[in-house]
Image (cartoon, helix red, strand yellow):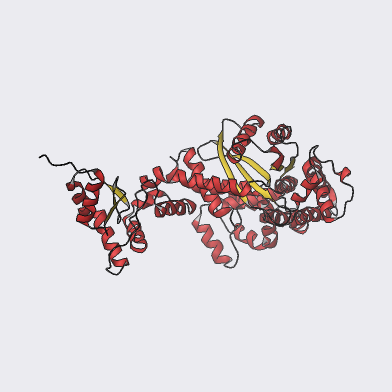
Amino acid sequence: MPKEKKTVASRLQGFVSEFGSDIFSTDNKVLICKVCETKVSSEKRFSISQHIASDKHVRGVQRFKRKEGNKNIQLLVPSISKKSEYNLDLCKAMLAANIPLNKLSNPQFRSFLEKYTMKDTPVESTLRLGYVDKCYIDTVNEIKEKVNGKKIWISMDETTDVEGRYIVSTIIGTLLHDSPGEIFLLNIDQLEKANHSTICKALDKSLLLLWPDGIQYDNVLLFVTDAAPYMTKAARTLQSFSTKMIHLTCMAHGLHRVAEEIRSQFGNVDDLVANVKQVFRKCPYRIQYFRNEAPDLPLPPSPVITRWGTWLTAASYYCTHFETIKRIVESFDESDAVAIKKSKNVFKLQQLQANLIYIKSNFDCLPIAITRLQEQSFLLSEGLKIVEEIQDTFTKLEGHHGIEIKKKLKYVLDKNIGYNIIRKISKVLSGEEDNIANLDLPDDMTASDLLYFKYAPLTSADVERSFSMLKNLLVDNRRSFKLENIKKTLIIQCNFITYTKY
């Protein structure tokens, strides 16, 4: 009589009995190694023996024996389709901390992880192919959950990355009537060119991530951008769909434009800042000499024109330490560098020191105000008070320089229509204004919508922070990063760390 062929279930149960239920388990369809948390080929007995002899399995048995004090290994049967929780957490942690996944190939790092986690460390490709997408999807779903049913503000800006691509960043934040809302990086996208049309398309694309069943335009109450003409035009286009939305141009950008006017009014001070900066740039000998001559004094600042308020901070530095810097620069041989000769010539100008004193005396408040406006989680009324303090200070300016700078501030504020609407809303919230009809609100905005402006932002500083993180991500040895992977990594990183708490 011929032998009856075993069923798959009985064959798998036989392997479990033979090799031990503390090592293997089965769901009657596949054989599972409890130690390695993986499916094992069971077509032939040799395949199982080969798995048991593998380095990975041997290491796993040793780890669990140490962990359990040489007791029998007790593990639950894992689900075949379930991803490893350890791998998922490891992937999320590395992306959030901006640790390249290829660091997993470092033997010392792998050894450290395996020693203290008692788990087998995955290779880079396992995380990249199997877990990065899940981390990204989980992050986006978490944003959607937290934003669901809430009013929001949006902030957008565009930059050019190290590869010359036009990159647009979309930040959103929830608007609550009783506390500051949460802030999220929603999307990073590439533009073919920077204009109002591409900005509108990028925003629609981002909002569809948030509301895939249809964009909830009535929940968008505030749009914060810089004052670039194409951003202003994009805002006007968007307001035809989002009829409750107010467009506010960033107040920190606006004050920085005033700072630029101050710089243009004092060309001699600008020459001083630019040339002394070059004197000490990449010159170890002069830097060391400076430190020997003025050990308690920081090196002359290196302001960047596009960084808000840094030029005024530099001018204040030269005012405070004028004589020391002049003495050190004049001790250098002007034949060594053109910048030394130019710096010496600027120091000879009679009006230079008087201009520095005027700038420090009247405009030291401006970089401080710009920094304060970039803070998060304060009341709208507190932010507006900062701007009003600058206005009050500038009303006292005199002389032809002062008149031009006052004109610039007035022009910036008058042109910012959203700022003037926001000011009126703040007065209603604080009880200073009783008549809502005087507010010039968007057509469909209701009185109940005003409640959500109590903690509304006045700047687009969060977008600038996302660009800083993008720059940190695209270092020289990571330039082959594809944009899709940049987007996923940055969204995980920003929302896991940066926007949780600054």
- List the single residue furthest toward the bottom: 69
Q: Is residue 333 visible?
A: no
> Of residues 379 and 296, which is closer to you in this image?
379
Where residue 93 appears, as percent x and y from the top left, is: 46, 54
Q: In which quadrant is the C terminus drawn?
A: bottom right
Where residue 279 appears, as percent x and y from the top left, is: 57, 52
Q: Is residue 302 visible?
A: yes
Looking at the image, residue 454 lies above or below residue 208 = below
- List the single residue furthest toward the front: 1
> Of residues 116 and 2, which is closer to you in this image?
2
Residue 53 appears in which quarter of the rendering?
bottom left
Q: In which quadrant is the N terminus drawn?
A: top left
Is 33 left, or right, of 382 in this rendering? left
Where residue 106 appears, as percent x and y from the top left, is: 34, 54
Where residue 55 appears, as percent x and y from the top left, is: 23, 54
What count of labels does the image hold? 0
Looking at the image, residue 285 lies above or below residue 308 = below
> Of residues 12 and 469, which is closer to you in this image?
12
State the residue at coordinates (71%, 48%): 256
Residue 419 appears in which quarter of the rendering?
top right
Is 3 left, or right, of 98 in this rendering? left
